[in-house]
Image (cartoon, rainbow, N blue to C red):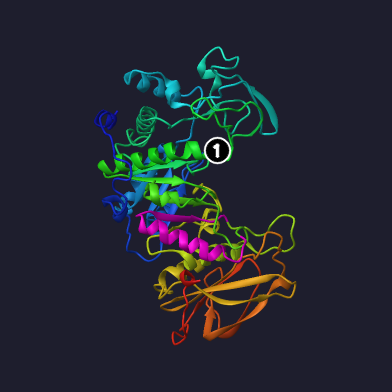
Amino acid sequence: MRYRSQLLCVCTAFLGTVGNSAYWSSVGAQENLEHALVYFAGPGDPGPGVNALVAQRYSMAMGGLRAGPNVVDIKALNPNFQFQVYNSSTDNYVPSDEDDLTAVIAAEHGTDAEECYIHYMDDTRIRIQNQEIFIPGWPDGSAATEAEARVVVYYANKTRRATGFSTFLARQINKEVVLGTTVDLAFTGTTLYPDGICLDNSPWKLGNLGTVLEGGHIAEDPAHSVAGTTAFQNWRWPGFGTFLHEMRDTLHLMGKGLTINVSSYWSDDYATYGVADFVYLEFIYDPVRNFGLNAIPQAWQRDQLAEAAGIRTIYAPAPKRNDPGFEGEITYGQALLGGLAWNLMTRTPQSLLFICGTADPGNAGWDTLTWRGCIEVAKNQLGLPSGDPYLFAEGTDPLGNPYRIYARDYDNGLVLLRNRGNWNQGIEPETAVPVPLPSPLAPVSPEGEIGTAVTTISLRNGTGAILLGDPGRHRSRPSVRDR
């Protein structure tokens, strides 16, 4: 193992070095509009044309070790390109090489693999994947071995078991296992090693536990909380947050970085614990998906908090065309433009963006699912933000929906965003309201076409707009941070 022998005695102090690092700044932290990429090629490799676009458009990618030849090609075109290899920190497949490695490393530390898992103390029944399953408990249940009592996640077939981080030894062993299956290994068919690790399923909240029907008490928790409850999450998170911080510090010693996928589970503790270099916000920050009159200021404040802690956010909206159960639908292009507008509205200079239409660059529709002309316009013509987001207009639309429209000035234009005001609102054409502009501005279409300058645009629920021109900086701009 390439690095693990160097790590057996590494003990990082909690909350030691939160902030800038060599890796954090190496991925173009001072660029204005940067992009990340999820790169999981399917049966066929994407080919040189797609790899050339990746090298041109993206600063970093996250994917598997089998992408090796493609990574070599991309780095030849863009030497600063960073590729982080994927793993999951919160569970292991059983049986698997990862589970076997856990046992080997645990033995080297004088313990066994169960040090690194969470267990049910009593006999437990849960409902998961619409199936009811039984997990015997240890030591107060019917399990013949402690391994049988490992907490099940995701699958009713019990093939994925939750890892534990409540002790220093558990964190150390799990750290060595993750390193041994990621940055210790060269990319397939190459002598190239990854630039860091992307840990999937890594928010403060452990999800996909199913619903506890009976039992469910956790053996490692001194209070024996029930899996999935608030008490359980409050017990588990400090150990896991510490593990992430220690993993990040260890990777920094190697000149490598850490990304964690937190999905929709945000916590301000990410900044306090210093959990990663990049926080991947999977499928969120989209004006259709994210409702609430204050959702946009909240996203802005979170990005500010992360930036202050040396954490870069990666926005990854999956363009959402409608909300099932409610009226209205927009085009894919309009949905993509809305996700881009959200990023432009609430990002800091260090944020990255990935339009998550597909994670497979070999997909025949990859280019149009992840990139459109409006992104090129924003990148090349909009310029830098000249201030914070601010409330631009508010009122009630023709269908009776309260709304707020937020704006942000850029050097060469204006960004507007109207997310759904509440969970029960649709995005019908009838929700549109006229929005007077501070000066004549030219709207940008999803395909990047720049229209004729107008003084008023129409903005429906769940959409955004990018406009080019002078936004009229003689007006006062009260930041959302002052609200």
Q: Residue at x 63, y 28 (%)?
A: 156
Q: Is residue 453 visible?
A: no
Amino acid found under the numbered disc labelled 1: Ala
Q: Quadrant of the N terminus?
A: top left
Q: Residue at x 42, y 61 (%)?
A: 304
| Percent of width and height locating residue 286 | 57, 60
Q: Nearer the viewer, residue 227 or 101?
A: 227
| Percent of width and height locating residue 470 | 45, 84
Q: Give the mark count.
A: 1
| Percent of width and height locating residue 11 | 28, 34
Q: Secondary structure at mark 1?
A: helix
Q: Is residue 302 magenta?
A: yes
Q: Nearer the viewer, residue 312 or 265?
A: 265
- Furthest toward the top, the residue is 144
Answer above or below: position of 395 versus 214: below
Q: Is residue 307 magenta?
A: yes
- Furthest toward the front, the residue is 223
Answer above or below: position of 235 versus 125: below
245 to the left or right of 464: left
Write down the quadrant of residue 217 in the picture: top right
Answer above or below: position of 14 versus 287: above
Q: Which residues are magenta?
A: 291-318
Q: Residue at x 56, y 53 (%)?
A: 365
Please tell me how crowded label 1 is: few (under 14), some (14-19), or many (20+) other residues with Cα within 10 Å: some
223 to the left or right of 256: right
| Percent of width and height locating residue 211 | 65, 34
Answer above or below: position of 454 versus 106: below
> On the image, numbered disc 1 is attached to which residue?
231
Q: Nearer the viewer, residue 257 or 37?
A: 257
Q: Is residue 435 visible?
A: yes
